[in-house]
Amino acid sequence: MEQNNSFSEITPEIIRLADMSAQAGIIDTELFTKYDVKRGLRDLNGKGVLAGLTNISDVRANKIVDGVQVPTHGKLFYRGYNVKDLVDGFAAENRFGFEEVAYLLLFNKLPDRKELEEFSCLLSSYRSLPTSFVRDIIMKAPSNDMMNTLARSVLTLYSYDDRADDTSLPNVLRQCLQLIALFPMLSIYGYQAYSHYHNGESLYIHQPRPELSNAENILHILRPDSKYTPLEAKILDIALILHMEHGGGNNSSFTTHVVTSSLTDTYSVIAAAIGSLKGPRHGGANIKVVRMFEEMKQKISDWSDEGQVADYLTKLLHKEAFDHAGLIYGVGHAVYSKSDPRAVIFKSFVEKLSEEKGLHNEFALYSLVERLAPEIISRERPIYKGVNINVDFYSGFVYNMLNLPMELYTPIFAIARIVGWSAHRMEELANNGKIIRPAYKTICTEREYVNIDKREA
């Protein structure tokens, strides 16, 4: 079939109509205050509107002192356990933690050794795609965006499931476990197809190995020689755990609740969550961090010179550098104001990896920006709360050191967050709640119908 070359073309007529549509959609910002509408489901102080209850995870960034709420160093809890304690626990025993923490989020308990072994074996048994799926689905029309490829693959799996629409908890759990197991293969095989057909690279399709952890399998099936160091696999494992879930109020987890509440199938729900995570305001931020640092390293002659670094950061805020958006990417968070616990946990492991890779100077530059950026932002802009680096600040640096292609940065996030989405889907179904249907205040005025021949141009 001949390709329609005009499929993606934006014509002058489309531009004109788009302008009309935009004008029709503009709402006076004063009306949001007048009707007490919480834009983005957040109040003027950035606090999220309560839209539900969850027992899965918790984000803490404040405490009450003498009846007043004051910012504190952030903490992240999975099912009541401090994530730092979880990471310290398996790191001290030199174990991988992804499977253990996934078990905790799904079943509300830490597994004993036997339970963990059985769960890991169950996930391993699900690391198998339907016959010819790679050839017939993944290899056909590979996209240059791996999140779209991932969503398409997830939706297509619906056709291979004889119980696709069954929303009973045992069946949904089965589907979720299969998706948790398959996400690395769907993401990486999608990238391999894209790299082969669009970039002319050699095509590698490695099968996962049952004895390997999730993190090890990611590196095994991605790299042509399947080789990796123990430290590389351990740090990727920690990255997956830190991205696995975040308080339930994030955009993609909320999307999971909303779409689940309609009682649609698991594949549609997870595809919707992937669509949410793909957005640069949610899952794509670490790519911006890496690209920002790439330009920074080119523009600054001495990476250790605080004056040069501070000058570049100031230019970022003044829209005079990088993408001219006025942002220092990786700095600031909607909830955390003193510290993001994920970034704090990550940093010590990141330093070890930078030493192994001989990238000490790059790590020193990141550390310098971490120290200077909050000071410069506070000086340049009025802010209602403190500002600090977030998990995206270091995750992109880690993925860069692991030689992960940038096309897979956000899919790696999804490979982790599918566990949180699965837990939220199960929670929504278990509580048998109502369909989530928020209210929008209508501000349009009533108008009289005019016959088409009497309408003004």
Image (cartoon, rainbow, N blue to C red):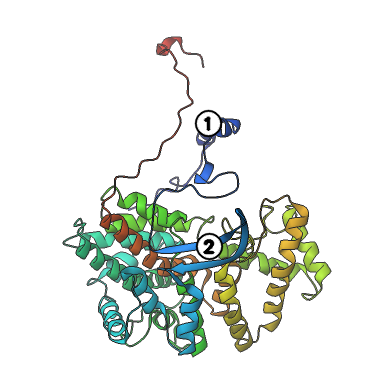
Image point 59% across, 44% down: which residue? 44
Asked if residue 434 lies left or right of residue 390, the reply is left
**Residue placed at 50% from the left, 82% from the top?**
88
Name which of mark 1 and mark 2 comes first in the sequence. 1
Q: Seen from this angle, which residue lies furthest front?
A: 66
Q: How far across and how far down the image is residue 82, in percent?
A: 48, 72
Q: Secondary structure at mark 1?
A: loop
Tell me the number on the disc at residue 35: 1
Which residue does the image show at 72% across and 69% down from the upper left?
371
Residue type at tag 2: Arg
- Alpha-carbon span between mark 1 and mark 2: 29 Å
Q: Looking at the picture, tell me which residue is in the foreground, 236 or 101.
A: 101
Mark 2 residue element: strand
Answer yes or no: is residue 249 visible.
yes
Q: Percent from the top left, x then y, of residue 367?
A: 69, 74
Residue that badge 2 annotates? 60
